[in-house]
Structures are given as C-alpha cells and as structure tokens.
Image (cartoon, grey):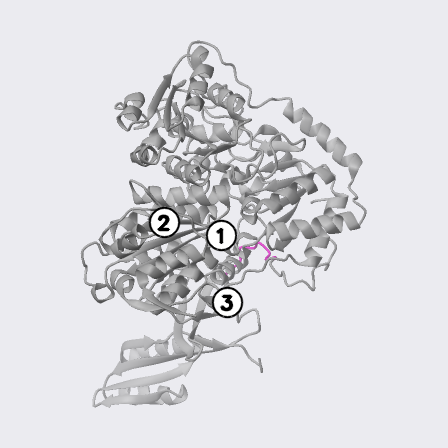
Amino acid sequence: MSALKLKKGSTSHSAYNLRPNFSDVQERHTLAVLVDNEAGVLARVIGLFSGRGYNIESLTVAEVDHEGHTSRITVVTTGTPQVIEQIKAQLGRIVSVRDVHDLTVEGKPVERELALFKVAGTGDKRIEALRLAEIFRANVVDSTLDSFVFEITGDVGKIEAFADLMRPIGLVEMARTGVAALARGAE
Amino acid sequence: MSKQMTGAQMVVKALRDQGVDTIFGYPGGAVLPIYDEIFQQAEIKHILVRHEQAAVHAAEGYARSTGKPGVALVTSGPGATNAVTGLTDALMDSIPIVVLSGQVPTFMIGSDAFQEADTVGITRPCTKHNWLVKETDRLPKVLHEAFHVATSGRPGPVLVDIPKDIQFANGHYTGPKQVETSHYQPKLKGDAEAIEQLVDLMERAERPIFYTGGGVINSGPAASQLLRELVDATGFPITSTLMGLGAYPASGAKWLGMLGMHGLYEANMAMHGCDLMINVGARFDDRITGVISAFSPRSTKVHIDIDPSSINKVVKADVPILGDVGHVLEDALRLWKARGRKTNAGAVQKWWGQIEEWRKIDCLKFTQSGPTIKPQHALARLEALTKDHDRYICTEVGQHQMWAAQYLGFEAPNRWMTSGGLGTMGYGFPASIGVQVAHPEALVINVAGEASWLMNMQEMGTAAQYRLPVKQFILNNERLGMVRQWQELLHGERYSHSWSEALPDFVKLAEAFGAKGIQCSDPDDLDEAIKEMLAYDGPVVFDCLVEKHENCFPMIPSGKAHNDMLLGDAETQGVIDAKGSVLV
C-alpha cells in the first residue's frame, strides 16, 4: 500500500461519493431517470445500455410532467458496484437526461409492476385459478366459459410467484409492464 | 426582436451569430437552400472538400488548432453517413464540432426517399447530442443549443439534421442571447475539500508525477499556463498522453516525454514507480495503462476530470476531482502557495536521481547508417529544420504517428492534431487542411504513412483549389507499418495483406493536382529536400522513402505492464502471450 495514506473521512462531507469498491459482487439497482420528453430520448438511453454492454432487467417509461415535458424512465439493472456507478455517470451525461436517481441507494424503494395473465381451463382448474387469484388479490378483467384474464399488481416476486402457480393450471399468455418505482418518504 | 426569414437564412445567420468564419462542406440535393444562402453572402468562408469524411476531419483540425468549434455541412443520406467516421473520431478525442446535415423533407421522412437515411439514428451513438429539426421556428434555438453543447463541459461533436422543407419555410429567427440557456451546464469548479487533499498529497509525496492529457488542451491556453506554473514551482516530473502533447513544453526541464504503449522508458517507469499520480484531464486509456492489474501499483491516484463517467471507469481514483482542469489547477496552485509552497524536496530530488538513471537508457536512440533513410532520422531532421517555425503538426495513424510523437517537440498547446482515441487512418491530410485554413501564414505539416495518406488523398483537390500550402510529409515504407510490426511480434511473421503492390508515383500524383512533388531516398539529400519543401509556397507531397522493416520502440506489449517494455529488436518473438494477443 501507498505511504501516502489518505486521512480517513476527510471527504465525508464531499459531494464526490464516487468511490465504489471495485468488487465483483453483482448488485441489482433500480434507477429513476428523468428525461426531456423528446424524440429519440428512449433510444439514447437504451442505446447506452446496449452499446456499453450493460444489462436491462426491466424498463418502463411514460411522461410524468406534461407541462415540463419530462418523462420518467425506470430501469432495473444489475452489475458490479463499479458498473452501476458507470451506468449512472454515463446516463447523467446524456444531454436530454435531467436527473438520475439510484433508488436502491436512497433506501429500499416502493416497486410495483402490473401484469395480465390469461389462464384457460374448465372444471376444477377453473375453480383453483379463481381461488389462487383471490389469495393474490388479482382481479378478473375478462372471462369466457373456458378462460380468465387476471390483472395483478405487486412487486416482481409476487408476480413471479403467481405465474409459477398458474402455469400448471393453464397459463396461456402473460403481459407485464415492467417495474415502476418511487423512493419512500416525503421527498 | 425576432425576425422573419427562411430556415436556410437562419442557418447562415446563426452561424454568423456564433462567430463562425469558416465551414467545410460538400453540397447535395438536401442542402441546396443553405448553399444558395452561402452563395449570397461573403462573411462565412466555405471550403469545398472532396469527401464528407474530410469535411469533418478538416473541421476537427480547425477546432483543435484554434480552440473554437469547427463546422461542417453535408447533404442527406450518403453525405451524412460519410460524416460518421469524423463524428466518432471527434467524440473519442473530445473535439467540439457542429455538423449540419440536410434531410429529405419532413413529409417524406420514413418513405425510403432518395438519399434518405435515419441520420439522427445513425449518429446518435457517435455524437454528444443530435437533433432532427421539424419546425422552422425551432431551428435557431437548436442551432444555438448545438454550439453550447459542443463547447461546454467535455467538448464533443453534435449534429443538426435539417429537412429540406424546413430550410425553405419561413419562421422567426431568435439570436443566441434571446434563447434561454439550456439546462445542460456542467460543473466547472472542483470540490474544495478534494483540492485540499491534492495539495496535502503534493506536500508529502516522495515520488510524484503529473500525468496529463487532452483535457488540459481542451480547457484552453490558460490551463496549460497554470499547469506549467504548477509543474515548475513544485519541480515534479510530468508526462503526457498523445492527446496532451504541448500543454507542457517539450523543452521544459520537468518533461519526461510521452507515456504509454510507445511512450518513453523514463515516463513509463516513473508512472510505474510513483507514489503520487496526478492525472490532469486524461482518461486512463488502454494505450496508456497497459495491463490494469499491474498499473502503477503503489501510487495514490488523483484524477481531475470534467466528465464524471471518466472517473473510476478504468482505474480507481483515490481522490477524484470533478471539474474543469483550468479551474481546478488554479485553485490547487493558489492553495499550495498559500500553504507555503511546501514539497518533500529531498525525496523528490532523490526521485529525480532515479529518473535520470532511467533516462540514461536513451530509449529513442537510433543509428542512421547505410543508404536508406530511417524514419526516426527523417523526423529528427524535420524537427531540426522546422522547430523554429510557427508550426502545426498533423498525423495520420500508425508507426509514423508514434515516431512523430516521440521525435517532434511541442512547445505550445493546439499545435498537434492527431487521431488518438479512434485511430483514424486518413485523418491527417484533411485535418491539415482545416488547420491551414485557420492559420494561413503558418507552416502546417502532416506527418503521414503512405497507406493512411491514400485513404483521403482526394483532398489534393481541396489543397490545390485553395492553394493551401500544406506539407504532406509521407514516410513511405510501402507497408502498413504498425500492422506489419504486430504480425511480426505475434503472428509468426506472416505478413497478411500488410503491404501494397500498387503504390502511385507520389510526385506525379502531386503534379497531376497542380501541386509540388518531392521524392527523397538518400539520407544525404534529406536536409536539402526538406528545405525545398519548406521553401515552396503551395501544397507539397514529400515522398520520403524509408527503411521498410523498421519497428517502433519502446513498446509495451499487449497484456504487459509499464515496467515490462521492449526497447529494441533484440528479443521480440513470443513476448506477447496468448492472453495478450487477443488485445488490440
């Protein structure tokens, strides 16, 4: 190690918390990216991930401020701490990006996803599907004599669990929105 | 204060309002209205290049040598796609340029119209930002914003795609002052605490080194001045990347020469052995670091950079300082002086003793003997005969580029134009045109290899048309020298397609364009031939026939560390292992 030891905590009040430990541990982070809602902005963000070889586990986007023309992109990504820092820095320098929040660092965020499940079957399977839907607080939004479409909201784990249970019963198709997330608390 | 005018008129007006005096371009169907406006004015000079790639490189040369943004104008479709290499080059080297491209009219976009390409889609990853303008009223704002983005923070290329109907339509023009400032405002001042930490480290360091890069040049001449003051006051050694040459003068007492893959022995050894590395506007490029796991293992690393994504990207910074180099150096210098100008002088002197030992290796020595000109000798003579001129040097990419960096001395910033990050063969000739247009009275030399030079040789037409006295100094070894060198080192001397069997007669080629051609093959004639080149008031192609199998040393082989350099031809076989050979 260097003889030039840095004084411990000497930059603790600094805004430059840019010191990741270069560990190999893969972390899962939810990022909220506020962008100008202009043509091509989603392509810029997605292109950054594909061009630099970063992962996207989930991505949602919609305009959240009609007057200010800003959209919120929620990206769930995985990587080593160094890669996560890079992703944030690279996102931050896209000109159309107003702000990047790492919700995972700011405290465990509220994360929700909406999914639609089409389950086909008759007799006992049909009854079982309804029972499970009730337990999971999924709503029936379409019904025929031999199928249901369920709507379910929850975190990723709940939706995955529901899918696992529905699969043997007769899961035909599902559509998921991807994760929307907000930091907890007043701010 | 807005004024009614056509989109094409707005383009010319906005360029004028942004202080643009020169643009490089090539006309075509989708930019005809803009060319019509250019025809009807005299304030902005338009240089007609012979290929759109050259327009962008010329704009880069203009930008690098002046510090002002360079501007290129190209048509839709192939005009825009030809600009892609130049845009990528400028992105990698952080060069501020504004490229304006024509586009098919808005109502035809998406219909596969003649000369239509998704220009903003294609150029999105190779620009800092780009815009497709679909309303004439928005055009002036976008143009002013384009200049702001290109020149603010870490500079870079931007592109504005302008459909033809927008160029014809009327709208309201707004000047740069009327346009609201963009939210894109990178931070310039460094964090005071981090700067204090830097000063504290400078006071205690036993084996310090400044490792500087293109960021110093991009920050402006004041940053170079501050760097010189800081280096000379502290007495610390300084090395620089390829992109940063000239920020500290090559004749300066503390100068170690360039570092990196073909850097000087003393510079690389000092990087390896230092205990304090002060990175000023450089980005730990792989040409610089060698293998990361063995990169400067015992040093505390301070990294000054304006781009947060540069920090901790490759090498962990112990003290990151986010800000403009000029601002940070100013604050650091002020604080260091206020705290009593302390350094660990005894230890630093001992450090210099070690560096002098490394210097004795004399890693750039060569012997010019026999009837063939060694490329190193050609550059040493070029240096001797031109160093007192008001001189700008461009290069292509390859061995000649590394030799130029090693054997030519740069005393001031903005005098050295080379393609560092992207390594674009064909960069140098058009760049030299851009430099010469910006500095009509100066001596502009493009040090080239014959293979690189041929990639944009159509620019002879541009040089001849505008009587630009650019000197094309071609080190002709009839080989792709750097490719050949790598094939020798790690592909068993199988020289697959690394030479040309059909090179032109460069003298006749020059004459065919109405320029002067000089060929020199005898070391005894070299000085006279160079003097003849310098004396000629017009473009010159200097065909310098050099040793065909000369390798470029020192060299850090792929996958090796700074202290593991090859110094000469003696033992080069098998030095790159399997792991290293997959690296480029």
Span of residues in magenta = A19-26
Mark 2 or mark 3: which is in front? 2
The numbered mark at residue B42 is: 2
Is B501 in front, or is B433? B433
Q: Is residue A25 magenta?
A: yes
> Which residue is tagged 3?
B183
Quick one: B308 or B223, which is closer to the camera?
B223
B508 left or right, relative to A93: left
* Quadrant housing the C terminus of chain A: bottom right
Tag 3's secondary structure? loop
Labels 2 and 1 touching (C-beta < 8 A): no
Residue lying furthest top in this view? B370
Question: Are both tags, 2 and 1, on one chain?
Answer: yes
Q: Is residue B66 visible?
A: yes
Say which amino acid is labelled 3: His
Secondary element under disc 2, as helix, strand or loop, is: loop
Residue carrying label 1: B155
Q: Quadrant of the N terminus of chain A?
A: top right
Q: Chain of mark 1?
A: B
Q: Examine the rendered structure and indicate whether residue B552 appears above or below residue A175.
A: above
Q: CA distance from mark 2 to mark 1?
A: 29 Å
What is the three-letter code of the residue carrying label 1? Pro
> Dot 1: what SS?
loop
Q: Nearer the viewer, residue B547 or B470?
A: B470
Residue B405: x, y in percent? Answer: 51, 31
Residue B441 drawn above or below residue B523: below
Q: Position of residue B470 (x, y in %)?
A: 40, 31
C-alpha span from label 2 to label 3: 34 Å
Name the N-terminal-most of marks 1 and 3. 1
Q: Please report the residue visible at 31 percent of the width from the left and 59 percent of the height from the top.
A: B8
Q: Chain of mark 3?
A: B
